[in-house]
Image: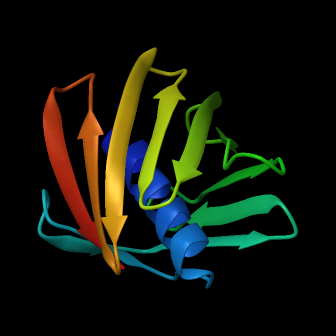
Amino acid sequence: MKETTRARVAAIVGAAKNQKKISSIYDYSTSCHRNISASISNGKVEGYDYTTSSFFSGSSNNSLDFYDYNNSKHVNLKMNGNKFDGYDYDTKKYFSGTINGKNISLYDYDTGTHYNYSI
C-alpha cells in the first residue's frame, strides 16, 4: 500500500473512532506530521491530503470505504470496535489494524510491516 493511502486510512479510522474531524496525523515510520483532514458525517467519508493536493471520499452506512482520487482506486475499510480491516484495490492487498485512543497501528500485508500513527 502506498504511504499516502496508509495515512488516509489512519486519518479516517481516527475520525470515525473519535467522532471528530482530523486535521493532521503523526506518522512514526517517517517521523513527521502529515497534513490530512478527514471527517465522517451522515454516513459520508470526506478528506483532503494536503501533501498530494488530492481528495478522498466515500459514502456507505455500514463501512468507511472511500475512493482515493490520487491513485484513482477504491479502498474498502470496515471498523469493528477498536479493530479495522480492509482491502486496497491499488496494490490488491489486505490490511488490518487497531486503534487505542489516539494511537493507530496498521499492518500492511503488501509490505509485511506494522505502521503506527497518532492523531
Tell me the residue at 50%/27% (across/down). 87
Is 101 placed above or below 56 here? Answer: below
User: Is 18 situated left or right of 95 in this image?
Assistant: right
| Percent of width and height locating residue 23 | 51, 82
User: Is 87 situated left or right of 67 in this image?
Assistant: left
Is residue 8 at all visible to an observer of this figure? yes
Choose top left, top right, bottom left or bottom right for residue 114: top left
Choose top left, top right, bottom left or bottom right for residue 103: bottom left
Quadrant in the picture for the C terminus: bottom left
Quadrant in the picture for the N terminus: top left
Is 97 placed above or below 30 here? Answer: above
Q: Using the image as rendered, state which of residue 62 and residue 28 is in the foreground.
A: 62
**What count of labels does the image hold?**
0
| Percent of width and height locating residue 8 | 48, 55
| Percent of width and height locating residue 39 | 67, 73
Q: Residue furthest right?
A: 42
Is 100 placed above or below 89 here? Answer: below
| Percent of width and height locating residue 16 | 60, 69
